[in-house]
Amino acid sequence: MTKKKPEFIMRDRDRNLMGEPIRYTPIIVIAGSDTYRLALHKVGDEWQVSHPEIGAKVLSLAYFHRGIPMTTRDLTIAQARNMAVQQIDSLIERVGSVKFNSVIQRIIKS
């Protein structure tokens, strides 16, 4: 028996549901003292990471080969997962864990 992937529904800026449920692969992220379970999934052909509880996109995966932007559609789930973890860690390092956490908490509370 295969394990069914979890699902979430994207939301717009006004927190209205958009579209059909999306199956995703969970990614555990630690920012400072907070831990998040984010969603790695495809939108169309491209990979992105979202916060499944609030339905908001965190980032779209960016893939470059020799400085040229490439599509992420042909990445395997393992490749996309590794890339997502690196890019989320880079985002947290760039903005800081305090800001990252405060933005997510502000959205959750609104």
Image (spheres, rainbow, N blue to C red):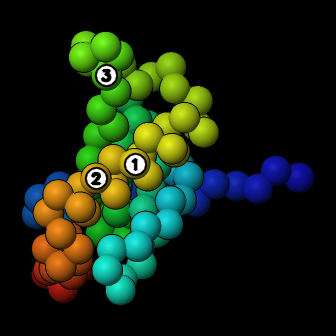
Question: Residue 76 placed where, x, y %?
Answer: 58, 30
Q: Which quarter of the figure has residue 33?
A: bottom left
Question: Residue 88 placed where, x, y %?
Answer: 33, 54
At x 35%, y 63%, the residue is 51
> Mark 1 belongs to which amino acid?
Gln
- Residues at marks 2 and 1 touching, judged by CB atoms closer than 8 Å: yes
Of residues 91 and 12, the one drawn nearer to the viewer in this rendering: 91
Question: Residue 74 placed where, x, y %?
Answer: 50, 19
To which residue does mark 1 refer?
Answer: 86
At x 43%, y 52%, the residue is 85
The Cα atoms of the two marked residues, 2 and 1, are separated by 6 Å
Residue 64, disc: 3
The Cα atoms of the two marked residues, 3 and 1, are separated by 14 Å
Query: SS at mark 3?
Result: strand
> Mark 2 belongs to which amino acid?
Ser
Query: SS at mark 2?
Result: helix
Camera sees residue 107: no
Q: Which quarter of the figure has residue 17?
A: bottom left
Q: Which quarter of the figure has residue 46?
A: top left
Question: Residue 93 placed where, x, y %?
Answer: 23, 61
Query: SS at mark 1?
Result: helix
To which residue does mark 2 refer?
Answer: 90
Mark 3 or 1 closer to N-term? 3
